[in-house]
Amino acid sequence: MLEIRPTCENCNKDLPFDSTEAMICTFECTFCVDCVELLQHVCPNCSGGFEKRPIRPKNLLKKYPASTKIVHKPVDLESHLKQLKK
């Protein structure tokens, strides 16, 4: 089951369970669509791609709550983009 993390790892923007702006990689690293664009659609943690995060139905939140743990690790964008050019 997905964690449904509450914010973007890079900019810390709120991404509630029903956000249409949340993107995840295969390891559930969570970023907003704006940051995914800046990252050129490559996860800075695992080098994988991103997909739109599914929206957990509201009626299931009580049984399967979204995570409240914030993972905020701002990306060194210059270094990330250099890695992509290698």
Image: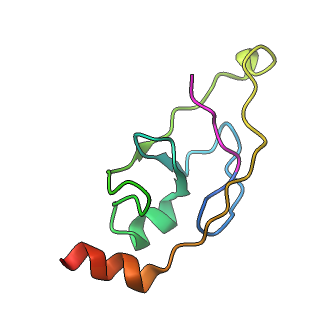
Q: Classify residue 14 by image quadrant.
A: bottom right
Q: Classify residue 46 by image quadrant.
A: bottom left
Q: Residue at x 29, y 82 (%)?
A: 82
Residue lying furthest bottom: 78
Q: Classify residue 17 by image quadrant.
A: top right
Left or right: 64, with 44 as reference point: right
Q: Position of residue 18 (x, y in %)?
A: 65, 37
Q: Quadrant of the C terminus?
A: bottom left
Magenta-highlighted residues: 1-6
| Residue 64 drawn above or below residue 55 | above
Q: Residue at x 55, y 58 (%)?
A: 32
| Residue 59 drawn above or below residue 76 | above
Left or right: 2, with 59 as reference point: left
| Residue 8 drawn above or below residue 81 | above
Q: Position of residue 16 (x, y in %)?
A: 71, 44
Q: Residue at x 33, y 79 (%)?
A: 81
* Magenta region includes residue 57: no
* Magenta region includes residue 3: yes
Q: Quadrant of the N terminus?
A: top right
| Residue 19 drawn above or below residue 38 | above
Between residue 17 and residue 24, name the one nearer to us: 24
Q: Position of residue 35 (x, y in %)?
A: 50, 67
Left or right: 24, with 62 as reference point: left
Q: Position of residue 50 (x, y in %)?
A: 38, 49
Between residue 16 and residue 76, name the one nearer to us: 76
